[in-house]
Amino acid sequence: MNGKQMEGVQMRLVDLPELGYTNEDKPFPRGEIAVKSAVVSPGYFRQPGETAESFHDGWFFTGDLGELDTAAGILKIIGRKKNVGRVLGGRTFDPDSLEMFYTDVCPFIDQICIIADETKEFLIAGSLLHFSPS
């Protein structure tokens, strides 16, 4: 769903203040992506519990976190709601975004895993480093 909104599909961002995502965020509103359309399934096949969690008043709550560039009309998926972690003190982090950042900016990091632990005041990371002999 990265890009422009499809014709016939309603979309909205739902505030998740407990994770730090709201429609008031600047420069771009952020929140959980919810969609409504005649082409969206009315629920999960034979899974009433999953359906009750994800579908409300005809809206499908995708679990994706989105950022909306209202001027350009472009929606960008920035993560998954279930992947956001919290550290001691309540501060939230999106480990996926941090992992992508570190692998992009540091040529020595091939892979990295970042974990938010609610019993610690800091993030935990493990990485696979790559060094080439010169």
Image: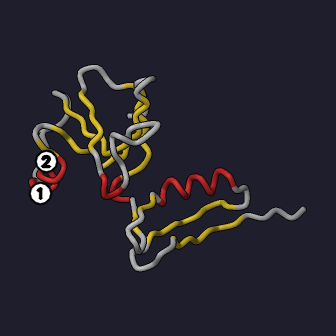
Q: CA distance from mark 1 to mark 2?
A: 11 Å
Secondary structure, mark 1, is: helix
- What percent of the width, then of the height, locates residue 83? 38, 59
Please, what is the three-letter code of the amino acid marked with disc 1? Gly
Furthest-right residue in this view: 134
Q: Residue at x 13, y 44 (%)?
A: 56
Please, what is the three-letter code of the amino acid marked with disc 2? Phe
Residue 29 lies in quadrant: top left
Secondary structure, mark 2, is: loop
Please rate how many residues cluster around mark 2, counting C-alpha atoms within 10 Å: few if below 14, some from 14 to 19, many from 20.
Answer: few
Q: Quadrant of the N terminus?
A: top left
| Residue located beneath label 2 in the image | 45
- What percent of the width, then of the height, locates residue 126? 58, 71
| Residue located beneath label 1 in the image | 49
Q: Nearer the viewer, residue 16 or 54?
A: 16
Q: Nearer the viewer, residue 70 or 77?
A: 70
Please rate how many residues cluster around mark 1, counting C-alpha atoms within 10 Å: few if below 14, some from 14 to 19, many from 20.
Answer: few
Furthest-bottom residue in this view: 119
Left/right placement of residue 9 relative to residue 103 reads left
Mark 1 or mark 2, whichever is nearer to me: 1
- How was the colour assigned to the protein in this rendering? secondary structure
Q: Residue at x 13, y 50 (%)?
A: 51
Q: Is residue 23 above or below residue 51?
A: above
Q: Is residue 113 above or below residue 1?
A: below
Q: Residue at x 9, y 53 (%)?
A: 48
- What percent of the width, then of the height, locates residue 92? 41, 62
Left/right placement of residue 56 relative to residue 129 reads left
Left/right placement of residue 1 relative to residue 42 reads right
